[in-house]
Image: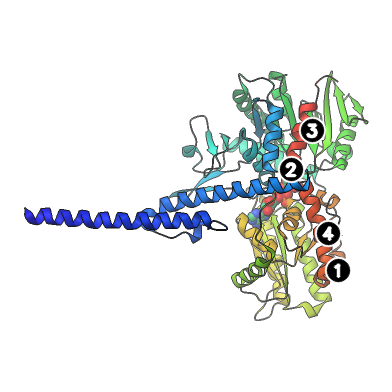
Amino acid sequence: MLKIALAAVLLFAVCWLLLVWSAGWLARWIRDLRTQERPPEEEALPRLGPLLPVVREAARMARDLWEAREAAEEEARLRIAGESRWTPERLKGHVRLILRDRPFLVIANREPYSHIREGGKIKCVTPASGLVTAVEPILQACGGTWIASASGDADRETSDERGRLRVPPDAPAYTLKRVWLTEEEEEGYYYGFSNEGLWPLCHIAHTRPVFRSEDWEQYKKVNQKFADAALEELSGSEEPFVLIQDYHYALLPRMIREKRPDAKIALFWHIPWPNPEAFGICPWGKEILHGMLGADLLGFHIQFHCNNFLDTVDRLLESRIDLEQFAVDRAGRRTLVKPFPIGIAPRRHPPAKDLASARQEIMKKLGVQVDHLGVGVDRIDYTKGISERFRAIARFLEKYPEYREKLAFVELAAPSRTSIKSYSDLGTELEQEVEQINQRFQTKAWKPILFLKEQHSREEVDLYYRAADFCLITSLHDGMNLVAKEFAGSRSDEQGVLILSRFAGASRELRDALLVNPYDIEEVAEAIREAVTMRPEEQRARMARMRSALEERNVYRWAADITSELARTRPDA
Ligand code: ADQ
C-alpha cells in the first residue's frame, strides 16, 4: 500500500516538474515569438509532440498580429506620403460605405478552397486560377458569400447541409456556398458549352469552337441552378450587390434580374470579347447577349473588348448604343459597358538581398548551374502559346550557341481541363516537344528546358519568379494574364526582364516589357537575347516603372472601381 502511495507521489512529482518545465519553455518561446522581426513559417516550428497544436496556434496568432502591425504601418506610411493607393483596409471601408449592410454576393464557377482526400486525411487546396487569385482578396477584405461549384471529393463533409462553410479555414472571413453539379451537368455546361464553345469563340487562337445543343441545354440548366442558389441567399435583403464572374454565367444576370429587379448586378468577363463576325458563329448568340444585358454593369479588362461587345450588340440585337456613356439601352433598361483592368494583390516579399538565396535554392532543387534562368508559368492551355515559347528557346540556342549550357528555361505548367481530350493531348504533346528540343541540345550535365507539369504552391511560384532572369509570356490571346503582373510584382530587387505577348491584355499597361508577337518565333528568340544581355540599370528602370503601374492599379482598386461604378448605375435607360 505504502509502495503504491510512494509511486503515486513520485509520478505526481514527475508530472508536476514536466508541466512546470513545459510551461516555462512555452512562455519563453511565445515571448521570443512576440519580439521576433518576422514570425516563423510552419516548417520551422519546433516539433514538440503533444505541445505541437499549442505551438501552431501561438505561431498563427503571432503571424496575424505581425500582419496587422505591418498593415497599420503601411496605412500610416501611405497617409504620411499622401498616396491614394488601395489597400485591403481601404477597400473594406469603401465597400462597407457603399453596401450599408446590404448583402454582397460573388458567383464564380471555381471555388477558392476545395477539400480533397489524400492519404486517409482531408486536405484543403486552392486552385491555379487567375480569377481566384484576383477575387479572393476582395472577399477576404469585405466578407460576404462566394457561390461556386463543388470540386473536391471531401467537399460534402466539410460543409453544412446547405453547402456552406466559413473560409479561409485558418482565419474565416467570408462564407463559401458550394453548389453540386451532376456529371452530366458538368460535362455539358463546363467542359462542353463553356470550354469547348465560348472559350475558343472568345480567344483568337485558331481552335474551332464546338457547339452542341445538349451542352447548351445543360448550360441553361446550370445557370438556372446558380440563379436559384443566389436567390436563396438573397431572400429577405434589399438592393443586394451581386458580382458575377466570367463566361460560365452569361445567362445569370437576366435570371436574377427577373426575380430581383432591385438587385445591383455586375458581370465581369475575364476573357477577351471577339469581333461581331467571330461571335456571330455562336448559334445562341442572341440569347447570350440578352442574358448578359440583364446586368447593370458589364466589365472587360480593356476598352478594345468593350468596343467589340458594343459592336456585337449593335449588329445582333435591337437596342440603342450610347457611345458617349458606353452603354446599351434596351427595353427601358440601361447596361454600362466599361473596362476594369484587373490587378494583383500586393504581397510582402523579403528584402532584395534574399533574392540571391532564392536563386541558389531553385538551382539546387533543379540540379542545374547556369548563368541565365528563364521561367514560364501557365495552365496548360492552347491559348497560352507554350509550344511557340519552346520553339523560340530552341531557335535562340540555335542562333546563339554560346548560350548552350549557360541558360535554362523552367516551365511550371499546371494541368487544366484534362477531361477535354484536346487539353490532355496538349499536355502530352508539350512533353514530347520538350524531349525533342532537349535531345537536340542537351549535354551530360545540362538540359535547356525543364517542364514541371504540376500545380505549384503560391510560395514556390514566387520563388521561381524571384530566381529568374526573365519571364516569358507568349499567349496567343489573353484577357489580361496575371503571371506578367505577378512576375513584376515579386521583383523587389527591380531586376529581371519581362517578355510579354502583345496579344495579352497586360501588354496595354506593362509597356516596359519586351513586347513580342508570339507567332513570330524569330522575334521572340531575339527578345530572349535582349533580355539576357540587358544592362542592370535598364532592367531597374523598366522594372521600377512596371512596379509603380502595378501598385497604382492593384486588385483592391479593381474591386473598388467596379463596386463604385455599380453603386452609381441607374436602371432606367
Ligand atoms: P487564366 O487563364 O487562368 O485566367 P492567368 O491570368 O495567367 O490565366 O492566371 C493564372 C493564375 O494561375 C496565376 O495566378 C498563376 O500564378 C497561376 N498558375 C498558373 N500556372 C501555375 C502553376 N503551374 N502552379 C501554380 N500556379 C499557377 C483568366 C483569363 C486571364 C485573366 C485572368 C484574371 O484567361 O486572361 O488574366 O482570368 O482575370
Question: Quick one: label 4 or label 3, which is nearer the N terminus?
Answer: 3
| Residue annotated with mark 3 | 298
**Disc marking residue 513:** 4
Secondary element at image label 1: helix
Q: CA distance from mark 1 to mark 2?
A: 37 Å
| Residue annotated with mark 1 | 526
Question: Quick one: label 1 or label 2, which is nearer the N terminus?
Answer: 2
Secondary element at image label 4: loop
**Disc marking residue 86:** 2
Q: Quadrant of residue 109?
A: top right
Q: CA distance from mark 3 to mark 2?
A: 22 Å
Residue 52 visible in rendering = yes
Q: CA distance from mark 4 to mark 1?
A: 14 Å
Q: Amino acid at mark 4?
A: Ala
Query: In this image, 496 relative to 348: left or right?
Result: right
Q: Kindly report which numbered mark, 4 or 1, lies closer to the viewer in this rendering.
A: 4
